[in-house]
Image: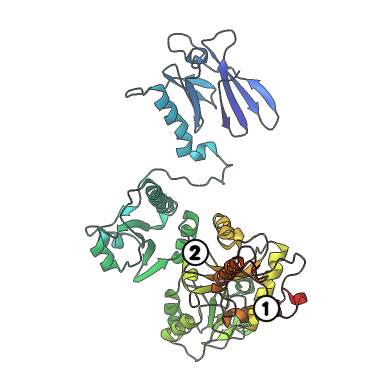
Amino acid sequence: MFYEAVAVGNEVYAFRPDVDDKDRTEVFVFNTESLRWVKLTPETPGRGECPVEGPSMACSGLEHTAVLIEYTVYIWGRNLLHAFDVHAHRWSIPDVSGTVPEVPVLLLVLLLLPLQLLVSLCRAEEGLEFPNFDGKDRVLDINERNFKKALKRYDMLCLFYHDPPPTSKGLQKQFQMTELVLELTAQVLEDRDIGFGMVDSQKDVKVARKLGLEEVGSLYVFKDDRVIEFDGELSADTLVEFLLDVLEDPVELISNAMELRAFERMEEDIRLIGYFKGEDSYYKAFLEASERFQPYIKFFATFDKAVAKHLSLKMNEVNFYEPFMEEPAVLPGRPLSEMDIVDYVTQHRRATLRKLRAEDMFETWEDDMDGVHIVAFAEEEDPDGYEFLEILKDVARDNTNNPELSIVWIDPDDFPLLTTYWEKTFKLDLFRPQIGVVNVTDADSVWLDMSNDEDLPTAEELEDWIDDVLTGRVNTEDDDQSADQRDDGDDRGHDATDDSYRDGGGRYDDDDDDDSNQY
């Protein structure tokens, strides 16, 4: 029998006592592609008190373990640490120092090593190796003594404003995970001259006040004379992408047909484009306005007559593209000042149909309509989801001038960690398109009944339902009222269940007049 085995790429290295000499260890390699075993003959097969042909597994019994670090297998047994080089096929005994721990303790240490060096065990081909935290502290503890120096030292400084470290173990782990996200982000962006720090809301009150930090749990980015609050998912990949966007120029120039084609395909984003004579023109006001919204709203400009003609842009004119709209709105007035542009964007940035994105998801969710959101779930890659999304676009285009309407589209594929939570909270099957109204205070919700497996609602039917939401005929309190009615009916011995509400309440079905008219 084999006592230990470790995976090295597509091969498995297995170790067992030599059948003829129990003081020796045999090494076998199993190739998972060819499904073929090979017995190795390690170099320097010495003998003696501390054999370099491997640990004596027969004597050490079960008191041994093996781990792979880089290209070396470390095996502890019989109170000795042996190392086997999988490239050279050579045994050695590392020169260790310190007090040798008891066997159970060392076993635990060796078992934990792969978790700390995950990249060694989950090695990808060259060019696809995901970064792992290297253990180097890069995130600063910002205080009164060092915050000015940090601001001067880096081109861009990111500060996480947090509550004092918690005392409970669960919250401590959460705090440590946040620190790890910042450390990994700092490691990946180490060559970009971006600094990272943490500001304690209790110990560093004066620093927070001087820097304008207000919301605990938020990340603030200091670039030049601007402060940008990150309102997205605090994960390393989302944060890295966000910061790289902040490093880019706030205005992207379009000068040829390929760039123009890429611009026209960006239907999910709010974007502005202006036509100017050159950089020394009214373009300066456009540039200064763009800095106030970077990187959440994208600004483009062109100095090219052909590009401007294709977009029907006049000199010093700016077009505003709402997400999913086919035609842009023209900002009134020419030429435009910085504040003209800022005021218009601020007034119109809440789109009729907007997609929930990881980089600004909390800003979107906090921008509710009187405490509620109309929320639509649809997987764009799914045929039904794609069809439903196209219906939503039609509804949005027909109602783009209604300031009371804003639909938040969520693609569950973008938030795999939240999908189960949403399904449990809203009692939904997110493998199918859904639309409902959600109270952002208590997550109470009412959802349009779309249980018909064959047909999705038409744009007209959706507009009727949305009109019921906007007029208050459908609201999140209906769920509670329906439950109260059922309780009253039970008390009277009658079934007071309303067919409009199913699955524990919260399902709306407009069947007042004709059952054949159900959505």
x, y percent for residue 271: 54, 76
Residue 297 at x, y percent in the picture: 50, 73
- Look at label 1 and name its amino acid: Asp
SS assignment at label 2: loop
Q: Is residue 299 left or right of residue 226?
A: right
Residue at the bottom extreme, as displayed:
333
Residue 451 relative to residue 336: left or right: right
Q: Front-most of 174 and 282?
A: 174
Residue at image mark 2: 359
Rendering coords of residue 25 (x, y %): 54, 15
Asked if 188 appears above or below 21 in the picture, the reply is: below
Residue 32, image quadrant: top right
Residue 394: which numbered mark, if any? 1
Label 1 SS: helix
Q: Nearer the viewer, mark 2 or mark 1?
A: 1
Marks 2 and 1, the one that precedes in the sequence: 2
Most foreground residue, 93 or 397: 397
